[in-house]
Image: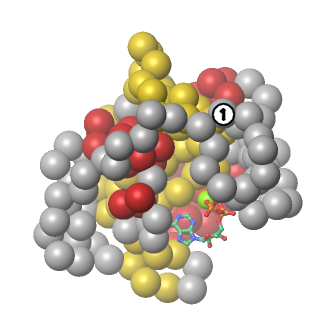
Amino acid sequence: MRVAIGLGANLGDRLATLREAASRIGRLAPIVARSHVWETAPVGGPPQPDYFNAAVLVEWRGAPLALLDALQQIEADLGRVREVVNGPRTIDLDVLWIDGQVVDEPRLVVPHPRLHVRAFALAPMLEVAPGATDPRDGAAFVVPADPGVRALSFAL
Ligand code: ADP
Ligand code: MG
């Protein structure tokens, strides 16, 4: 199955962290596409630094929950500590979208519940999955206007 994974970081060396996470994701599953790196203003939570966000599209052959487990292991290995909700983080890895599939479990909801309102997640996702549709109703995802979300000149 084709899966879009969102990457975010706003503490430490944001680019190095995103690239290390992408490299580890590449050891789990073949990476089919990589987005640009986007610099984005934080949404919600306490005052905190801007994020770097990106997305990769992977070909995943296991269960969706097994992918979540693997991504959470990468978060832990890269030093993520969960403190404040929506607070700053060294790395956040989210399962944004699975082509043609809905997941609704306590630990994993796909499409990601806030995907449609989050330009910082959707803009990079649509670079790696252009024309992606919501498996619940077939509607195309559209990036909401957000001046706080800007593409940098380089790819992940
Ligand atoms: P957030 O990404 O919402 O800022 P966290 O990364 O701390 O917050 O994730 C909180 C919980 O969200 C995780 O423990 C995970 O089980 C759950 N979760 C539900 N759906 C998803 C998804 N699509 N991708 C990643 N985590 C998810
Ligand atoms: Mg997360």
- The disc labelled 1 sits on which kind of residue? Asp
Q: x and y percent of residue 88 in the render? A: 76, 46
Which residue sits at x=34%, y=49%?
144
Q: Is residue 27 visible?
A: no
Q: Toward the viewer: 47 or 5?
A: 47
Q: Residue at x 38, y 32 (%)?
A: 35
Q: Residue at x 36, y 60 (%)?
A: 116
Question: Which of the four quarters of the rendered structure image does ligand 1 lie in?
Answer: bottom right
Asked whether, in this view, residue 94 is left or right of residue 89, the answer is: left
* Residue at the (23%, 77%) spot, across then down: 136
Taking the image as shown, residue 43 lies to the left or right of residue 149, namely right
* Residue nearer the viewer, 124 or 46: 46
Whole-percent x, y for residue 118 in the image? 45, 53
Secondary structure beneath dot 1 equals loop
Would you place residue 152 above or below residue 84 in this image?
above
Give coordinates of residue 17: x percent, y percent. 67, 31
> Which residue corresponds to mark 1?
50
Residue 51 position in % (x across, y down)? 63, 36
Residue 101 visible: yes
